[in-house]
Structures are given as C-alpha cells and as structure tokens.
Image (cartoon, coloured by chain):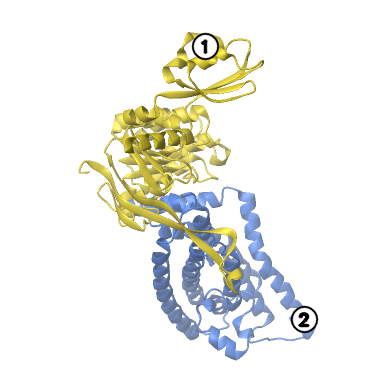
Amino acid sequence: MFASLEKYYGLFRIRAKGITVYKGDFVVTLLLRVLFPVLMIFVWTAVYVTTGTTKIAGFSLLGIYAYFLITASLAPFRSDIDDMIGSDVLTGAIAVFLVRPITYLLDSIITDLSTVVVGFFTLTVPILALAVLFVPLNASLLLFGLFGVEAIAAYLISMLLEIMVGLLAVYFTSYAGMAAVINRCMSFFGGGLLPLSFFPSQISTVLSYLPFQFLYYVPAATLSGSISVQSSLFSLAIAAIWIVGLFVAAKFAWRAAKKHINAVGV
Amino acid sequence: MPDSIITISNVKKRFKTYKAGEHKKGFLGRLMRKYYYNQALDGVSFGIKKGEITALLGKNGSGKSTLIKIMTGVLHPDSGEVLVDGMSPWGDRTRLAKEIGVVFSQHNNLYFDLPPSDTFDYMKSLYSVPEHEYRQRLRYLLKLLDFEDKYKTQTRLLSFGERMKGNFISALLHNPKIVFLDEATVGIDLPSRFALRKAVQQMRKDFGTTFVIATHIVDDIEALAERIIFVDKSKVIFDGPRGEFDSIIGNKKHIELQFSDGVDPKIKGFGKVLEQGEGYIKLEIDSDKVKDKSLSRLLFSKGVIDYSVYEPDLSYILGKFYATLDKRKK
C-alpha cells in the first residue's frame, strides 16, 4: 500500500518539478491563460456601458466580471491529457511507459494531476483572491465548498473526455485537427466563452443535459451566485452520472486501443 | 525449452501500412488510401536461457525491434505464444515490468528537462527499491559506466552517448532479471559504447543478469554475444552459439586501402579481393592477419594514403549466410 503511494508520489514530484523547471516560460504560459477572460471583461464592460444595460440574461456587469474571473481560475482544471497521450502514441514514446510497472493511463493521469495542482496554487488561488477583493465576490463558505467539488468534477469530466480524444491518435495518424475542434466545442458548449444562459432557451436546455456545462458554467455560476444551491446540487448529481458513464467509456476505449498501438520505430 | 527464461513459439505480427500516392479503384477511390500489410514476424520461435547474453541480429526492418516490443509487452502479437520469466508479457505486463529492464535507442527513459539523478530517484520509488540498496546500486552503476560527473547535469545538455548511459542506469537500478537493449549502442561515441559493453559483461558476471541485445552492429556481437539469433525477412535464419555463427561467416575482417599511384599488387597476397578501382582495393582477410608484420609494413608504406580495417557488414554476412544455407540444402 505505502510502496504504491510512494510510487505515485515519486511520479507526481518529478512531473511537478519538470513543469516548473523553466520559471519564465511557466509564468508566461500562466499569463496567457488569463488573457482571454481579461479581454472578455473589457468587451463586456463596453457592451454594458455603451448600451446602458444593467442586466443581460441574469448577469449584471459585476456578475460578468465574477463569471469570467472564475472561468479563468478554472483553467488549470481543464485536462491536457489528450496532448500527452496523442504525442506518446504518435512518436512511439509510449513504449517507454509501457515497460514500467505502472498502468499507462494512471501514469498519464498523475502527470496531468501534477499540472492541475501546480496550476491551482499559481493561478486558481490568486485569481479567486482577486475576484474576492476587487469585484467583490461575496460567496459563502458553502458556495466555495460546492465550487471546490464542482471544480474536481470539471477536471474528472474533462480528463475522461480528453483521454478518448487522445486515443484517436491510435486510429488516425493525424488527429490534431479533430482534437482542436473537440476542444473548442468543449470550451464553447461548456460556457468558457459565454455563460450558457446567454444562449436561446432550447439550446441551453439541451446543453444542460450534456457533460460540457460542468467544465465552466456550473462551477462559475455557482460561485458567482447566478444559480441557486439547489440547482447546483442537482447539476452535481447529473455530473456524477456523467463521470461514471465516461469512466466506463474511457476504460473500454483504452482496452480497445491497447491492441492497436503500433509503437513507432518497430 | 524447459530451462528457458524466455520462450517464443510461432509468433506472427503484421502492420498495416500504405504507400504515398496509391489509392483504391473507382469513383470515390481517389479519396481512400490503398493499404498493405507488412509481415514483420512470420512464425518466429526460440528460447533464451537464464544468464545468457543473446544477440538478436538483423538489418533495419528485419523484425528484431518488433520482437523486443512483443517480449516486453509493448506490442500484442497477432498469434503465437510468448512466456517471459513465466509470464505473458501483455497479460501480466505490470508484474513482468518489475523483473525486466528495457533500453530503447529511439526513446528516452530520462526526463529531458531534469538531470538523470531525478529520473533515478523516481525509478527508486517506482520499483520500490530500498534506500540502502538503491544507494549501493547507484554507486556501482555510476562507477561502472563512468557517469559520476554527469548524472546531476540536465539531460538535455548531455551528449547522445551520455544519455544512453543514463538510460541504461535507469533501466537497471531495480536489478532486473532480464535486460532488453534495443539498438542501444547505435550512433553513440566509442568510449560510451565500450563502457556499455563492459557494463553488460560485468553485470552478467556479478548478478547473472540475462541480456537480450537487438543490434545490426556486428562489432557488438563480436564483443558480447554468446548466442546469436539472426533475423531476416521476418524469420529466424540462424539460432545458435557464437562459435557456430563464426564458423559460417568465417573469422574474417575487411580492409580497404587507397594508394597514391595505383594499387600495390603485393596487397592481393593477403586475402580475397572483394572490390578494386583506381588506386582503391577492398579485401577480405583472416582476422589474425591484422597483426601480421608484413601487412603492417605495407599499410605504413609511402604509397598508402589511407586504410581502414573493420568487421564485415550485415549485407555481406547475409550473403554468406544464404550461400551456406544453399550449399547445405544441396
């Protein structure tokens, strides 16, 4: 048991060390992730001020500030595991991991988690602190707690979806275009570019049953107070069902893909 | 084979591939590629004994790397049976991984942006190596491969040969029973190559480690292998001890000379002429003739601009092999 934990901690440590080895690059990447939400804040300020509107689809201007700051804070919870799996499969580097006494997927998930944890401390915490101090975001501890659980659910859903996207590399030599389209869809239908309540009601009803809303919209709407605690809890229950379903699907996808892996350089 | 640590029976594996510009027939055919199947292994069988140093010899694309990947659980064969240390490589992959060490020349085991020492520390926790054993083994391997000054330098700053030494150490820190080296000595500098060879011999002596070495470098075989499995066109064309292999190809070396004023006819008396051109000659000579004094005198004479002595290359050996097989059939 302890030997297993030591193995996973060892992997987590070396990956986290690898991410932060070039500190300048690390900081620039972080700043780049914040660029879009900052841009959105300027765009929506212009919209609200020039039109004299006080509320759009239930969001006040301060609500919009809070929403985009919270989605920015969620950036580390979007998994990058598809890139990792895709490049390991295409370059054949997967061979190195397949001869180690650890399941490849678990190795990739822990590697991915090290990015999440580093990102949580360097991006999520400072951005949320900014939101609390300057917007100001008046969320109760209960809402922060719910947000925490939803952020974890967001990561699990994005990670399980991205595993299947990454495994496309096993079947298609060139999968990057497809992966980019799927990733953009995840951001768009997840509420990363616009709050889902901005969409026409029929579309938002459909989206409320899909897994993407949990990536940004549900946690951001919960913490900014634009949805009630009850509907947030209801969303969490749907998220749990999606997580179980996607877990089973990802497991089958990996089992099928394993037999087709032709490590490059054979 | 009952005393074998590795048994392979009738293994077949093919890969799907396509050729650029070739499409299927018909109206929509232009949009669809025409696929071919490349038979990488076609009914391969052999056994490897515990503590043996075995060379899997073959040209590039002969199927030896596919064999290594099947034996280590990376690839699934289409058919056939494989047992490595009593386990199925793909069925018991993570359990088998604890008993084997693998070095791929094309893929780095070291984390590129960190020094090898970080990878070594991770290997310690990955394989649950006790602290004192780890320190002892690390010291032993660092000394054996002359890597003490380098293992704390960032991997990306190391030479290819140094990285290969680091890969080798990381694959052996957990004291595996079987070590697979996939073209591990290709493209590295001579001192590193010699250090790796020395390490293989020493580890076999000290720990009884079994080594399976896939290579197309005949020199490696001369220096290391006790047993040779020769793979060509997806089949095993020879499986036997080094002595038998040497008796087929003969204990020969190749020598090439360049003369300033035409080839000195005296050189032809030292061996069989393979090629000759304007001021150039290539000969096959008996290995012991390399130290012949009269040959040395001729090599150092004024008329010789340049010369080189080397092991026969694989294409030449293959030719000899097929000729011998034909003779035996007749």
Q: Is residue A94 above or below residue B318?
A: below
Q: Chain of mark 1?
A: B
Q: Quadrant of the C terminus of chain B?
A: top left
Return the mark for residue A49. Answer: 2
Look at the image and give the colour of chain A.
Answer: blue
Give the percent coordinates (x, y) of residue B37.
46, 58
Q: Tell me the residue at 59%/75% (across/down).
A: A185
Q: Is residue A80 above or below residue A51?
A: above
**Residue type (three-letter) at the residue carrying disc 1:** Ser
Q: Position of residue A19 (x, y in %)?
A: 55, 52
Q: Quadrant of residue B240?
A: top left
- Which residue is identified by label 1? B296
Crowd around label 2: few <14 · some 14–19 · many ≥20 (10 Å): few
Which chain does the numbered disc 2 sit on? A
Quote the CA–CA distance across marks 1 and 2.
Answer: 94 Å
Picture colour for chain B: yellow
